[in-house]
Amino acid sequence: MKIFIALLFPLLLTFLTGCATSGSQAAEDLSTRKILATTTVGMISDLVTHIGGERVEVTGLMGAGVDPHLYKASEGDVRALERADIIFYNGLHLEAGMSGVLERMADNRKVVEVTRGIPRDLLLAPAEFAGAYDPHVWFDVTLWMQAGETVRDSLIEIDPGSRDIYEQNYDKYMAELEKLNAYVLEQVARIPVAHRVLVTAHDAYNYFGRAYEFEVVGLQGISTEAEASTADVQNLAEFIVSRQIPAIFVETSISPRTIEAVQAAVKSRGWDVKIGGQLFSDAMGDANTVEGTYIGMVRYNVDTIVEALISQP
């Protein structure tokens, strides 16, 4: 019996500690200090920072140039998640490698999928993505504004005393995003609709294409987990030559070698396609840069695309 109790005690202590942690977190008055929020991708970090303002301290896990499709949580990430009062992630399988960790964290803290409030009929579900939705919703500014509603409401839920702050911050930032959407529409209008063909490393821009009338062609699929084959490269090269597309684009979070291979294959067919620039897709720019903000990233992408494609023959 003594041996049994000795073996059982550590397990019982762990259980009680876990219950105490969960209960104390739920009962704590968060109005006495800053809310600790941990986020996955930079676009969400930026959204939470703007809406949370001075009430929220944001810790982002994935910085510039990081591919969330392939990302695995490190020991340091797990500690940051454990310290958080609230965790925000994109969902729609964007952070597929972190799904197990996020599920475990939801047992004793608030874990929020920022895309959950977007009506399913507004989400894209390409056939090649095995029945799942395309997660890259931030490239339609109007959809990202809906993600902002979820962030606002979730912060109010755990910190109701700061409702006015969150609502005022939300309203202010949404006004900025409305201006951003107008800017995108104004700039892409410089390119005739028939010439709006966006060729990139992977299919991250389908929401952008739908919202702003672009035909989007990615060498890889929506996820970067699968490598592009030689046949993929050759087929894309044929498409570019047949449409006489003047520019294709690399992405900051993906190696440029496959797009460079496409460029070489196009040249061997007698057409000269330039690399029109590097676009941000699954990650924003470096911290403390214009492109390290959501608005700056979107403006940079649009300016890069327009300037490269405006030369369409």
Image: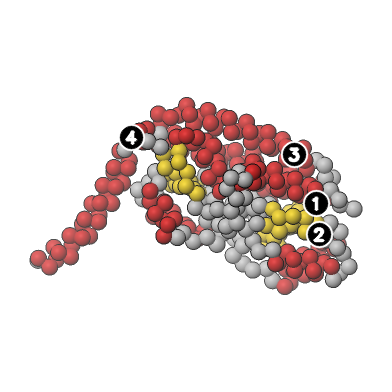
- Mark 4 crowdedness (10 Å alpha carbons): few <14, some 14-19, many ≥20: few
Q: What residue type is labelled 3?
A: Leu
For badge 2, the amino acid type reads Lys
Left or right: residue 86 versus residue 208 is left
The Cα atoms of the two marked residues, 2 and 1, are separated by 9 Å
In space, the residues marked 2 and 4 are separated at their CA atoms by: 57 Å
**Label 4 amino acid?**
Asp
N-term-proximal mark, 2 vs 1: 2
Q: Counting residues from the N terminus, which is met first, the one under dot 4 or under dot 1? A: 4
Which mark, by number, is residue 308?
1
**Residue 273, percent across and down?**
83, 61
Q: Position of residue 249 (x, y in %)?
A: 74, 57
To which residue does mark 4 refer? 29
Q: Distance between the residues labelled 4 and 1?
A: 53 Å
Q: In the picture, residue 57 is in which quadrant?
A: top left
Query: Vertically, is 246 above or below 190?
Result: below
Q: Which residue is the site of mark 3?
A: 185
Which residue is denoted by mark 2 in the rendering? 274
Which residue is at a point 84% across and 56% down the rendered structure image? 246
Q: Which of marks 2 and 4 is nearer the N terminus?
A: 4
Query: Which one is in front, 311 or 11?
Result: 311
